[in-house]
Amino acid sequence: MPEKKTLERAQEDAREGKAPSTQAGEFVREEMEHIREGKHGARSTKQAIAIGLSKARRAGVKLPPPKEGKVSQRTRKQAERNYAQGQTSPGRKASPRRARATEMALQREGKQAASHSALSRQARASARSRGAANRSLAAKKAARTRARETS
């Protein structure tokens, strides 16, 4: 179950008309904080991000599942289920036994997945796979946003 603060931040982003991925970013941020606090760990940065996106979908963020071929079929199906669950009845808790099992499994994992260097590596790898044109567009958009925020 996401924290109240995280839900409020995501709802504020939605009210401001920000993209679903921006809203979901709040859940990913919360997940990274949990790992840094030592609440639990993650096997990789990718897993930590996936947990955050899953929470976002289940909380009702209109973040569609990844397209076919982008991830494994199993991951895509799970994302579809999370999305459907979030659109119909957001905020339902998992059974205590299941929640505890998940928590215990994650506690056995390391804490390096949320380190600044790991996040940086993940971001760079993700950007590389998207291609030069896409990176260029993202940089131009970032520059426009920065110009707007400073003025």
Image (cartoon, rainbow, N blue to C red):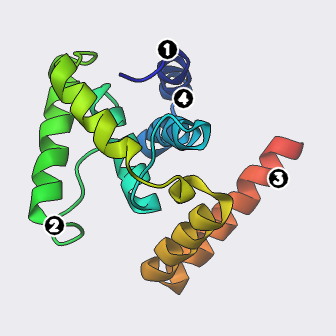
Task: Please name whichever residue, 142 or 128, is drawn nearer the observer in this view of the structure.
Answer: 128
Which mark, by number, is residue 13?
4
Give the residue drawn at x 10%, y 51%: 77
Marks 3 and 2 in Cβ contact (< 8 Å): no
Q: Is residue 150 left or right of residue 20?
A: right
Looking at marks 3 and 2 on the same chain, the residue that comes earlier in the sequence is marked by 2
* Closer-to-camera residue (93/89): 93
Q: Residue at x 51, y 58 (%)?
A: 113
**Alpha carbons under labels 3 and 2: distance apart:** 39 Å
Q: Is residue 31 visible?
A: yes
The three-letter code of the residue at mark 4 reads Asp
Question: Splitting the image into 4 quarters, where does residue 43 fall?
Answer: bottom left
Nearer the observer: mark 3 or 4; the answer is 4
Amino acid type at circle 3 is Ala
For marks 1 and 4, give the CA distance.
14 Å
| Disc 1 residue crowd, few under 14, some 14–19, many 20+, Cα 10 Å | few
Q: Which mark is residue 147?
A: 3
Horizontal and vertical percent for residue 27?
46, 35
SS for dot 2: loop
Q: Which mark is residue 18?
A: none
The residue indicated by pointer 1 is 4
Q: CA distance from mark 2 to mark 1?
A: 31 Å
Label of residue 72 in the image:
2
Residue extending farthest right: 151
Residue 29 locus on image (x, y percent): 55, 40
Q: Nearer the viewer, mark 4 or mark 2?
A: 2
**N-term mark: 2 or 1:** 1
Q: CB under 8 Å between callouts 2 and 1?
A: no
Q: Looking at the image, do the residues carrying marks 4 and 2 touch, with CB atoms under 8 Å apart?
A: no
